[in-house]
Image (spheres, rainbow, N blue to C red):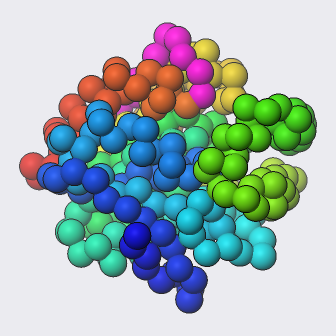
Amino acid sequence: MAYFKYQDKSVFYEEYGQGKPVIFLHGNTASSKMSELLMPRYAENFRCILIDFLGNGQSERVEKFSPDMWYDEALQTIALTEHLQYGKVSLIGTSGGAWAAVNAALERPDLFHAVIGDSFDGRTLNENFSANLLAERKAAKEDTQARQFYEWCQGADWENVIDLDTEALLKCAEEKRSLFHRPLEELETPVLFMGSREDESCRNNMEEEYKEMASKCSRSSVFIFSSGGHPSLFSNAEQSAAVIKKFINQYIAE
């Protein structure tokens, strides 16, 4: 079990495989446990580093999450990259982790070869975000399978983790906080925006939003799956892995 320090707190990470380094960034209420399921598809080609953001999984707990959590998670990602001393790495962020990935690259383009932002709303949260979030979290707590998923990812204190996450997201939405801390036009790192048309957790016009974002970035691609739920990194696991490997390998030689 490996840890690094961020703001005097212990952040958990683990590594799989050999090759060029790739950091996997999990989404809200999830943890590195989810990314472990993908390792058979990636560890033969890359050195895969899986992080538990502060307050999640096996990382040290926090009293509350920042409403700017995806920026804070970007700073944790930068701190991990510096701690590893592997040189440039690539980032695969899914759901909330996608915002963290893009923000990290906006802050420190010198650290990253390529960024994949999978299954997220884009520049703004969808207009029904808060109502949908509250309904989703209430239903999940009453669903045995969802409760088991939360406990598997977070441990015995899963309910407190979920409540803190919900509180932070609602505040982020209420205050209409910027999800990217710099303009996308400043993104120097090659980025792939990826998602599924059937993803009910994201905005209805995902493809339009991704293409609009891509138009603002100097080196960008968009890949939308016709089917599959949230997130596409898992619902289209085999196809996603092929698309991502091709995208990353295009740039790691630079």
Residue 97 visible here: no
Question: How many dots with numbers?
Answer: 0
> Measuring 34% from the left and 70% from the top, which residue is drawn there?
81
Q: Is residue 196 left or right of residue 192?
A: right
Residue 139 visible here: yes
Asked if residue 99 is among those painted magenta in the image, a careful observer would answer no
Q: Quadrant of residue 156?
A: bottom right
Task: Find residue 226 and report its horizontal and vertical position in percent.
Answer: 49, 10
Asked if residue 228 is among those painted magenta in the image, a careful observer would answer yes
Return the residue nearer the eye: 100 or 109.
100
> Measuring 49% from the left and 36% from the top, which residue is drawn there?
118
> Measuring 38% from the left and 37% from the top, which residue is drawn there?
38
Q: Which residue is situated farthest in the top direction here?
A: 226
52 vs 114: above or below? below
Quadrant, the N terminus: bottom left
Task: Find residue 103 and report its horizontal and vertical position in percent.
Answer: 50, 59
Q: Is residue 207 left or right of residue 165?
A: left
Q: Which residue is situated farthest in the bottom direction here?
A: 8
Q: Which residue is situated farthest in the left direction here?
A: 253
Q: Quadrant of residue 47?
A: bottom left
Return the residue nearer the eye: 196 or 84.
84
Task: Find residue 135 and report its horizontal and vertical position in percent.
Answer: 89, 34
Q: Is residue 232 left or right of residue 206?
A: left
Task: Find residue 164 and report its horizontal and vertical position in percent.
Answer: 80, 61
> Measuring 81% from the left and 61% from the top, which residue is drawn there?
160
Return the residue nearer the eye: 131 or 61.
61
136 vs 57: above or below? above
Write down the region rendered in magenta. 221-230
